[in-house]
Amino acid sequence: MALVVLYGVVMLRITVESDTDGSVVRLAGRLAGDFLEEARRVCFTDKPHLLIDASELQSADADGVTFLATILDGGGRWKAYRSTSRCASVL
């Protein structure tokens, strides 16, 4: 699990669960700016059958949306029960 904290406030929480069927990366908070680098590192580290769970993602800037689109274009899957309008545009 990766946790990015700024001044005592959680900006982005990244949780990874892997098994023989693939990996689930859960994103919670804000996918933007400097916090995006950790998400890239986690998601682009040889994870076959990647599922992004964005049900707790609150917002994403333009780079965050591009990042999510890149994952989907590369064969990743998306799970979001509550998505922001910016994130939903990737779907």
Image: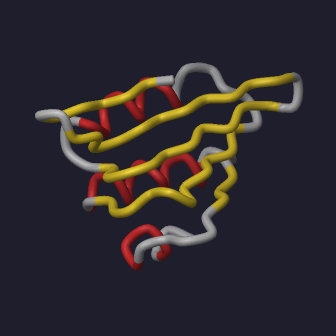
Q: Quadrant of residue 5?
A: top left
Looking at the picture, how far across and down is residue 54, in whole percent?
A: 54, 56
Furthest-right residue in this view: 20
Q: How many numbered callouts?
A: 0
Furthest-left residue in this view: 7
Q: Residue at x 71, y 32 (%)?
A: 23
Image quarter hosting the C terminus? bottom right
Relative placement, left or right, of 64 versus 33 is right
Looking at the picture, how far across and down is residue 72, in whole percent?
A: 60, 53
Instruction: Please name the colour scheme applied to the rendered image.
Output: secondary structure
Q: Residue at x 37, y 51 (%)?
A: 29
Q: Quadrant of residue 79?
A: bottom right
Tell me: residue 60, above or below residue 83: above
Looking at the picture, how far across and down is residue 40, in whole percent?
A: 41, 32
Relative placement, left or right, of 64 versus 87 is left
Looking at the picture, how far across and down is residue 83, in whole percent?
A: 50, 71
Tell me: residue 6, above or below residue 27: above
Tell me: residue 66, above or below residue 47: below
Relative depth, front residue between 63 and 8:
8
Q: Residue at x 46, y 75 (%)?
A: 89
Relative depth, front residue between 28 and 85:
28
Furthest-front residue in this view: 8
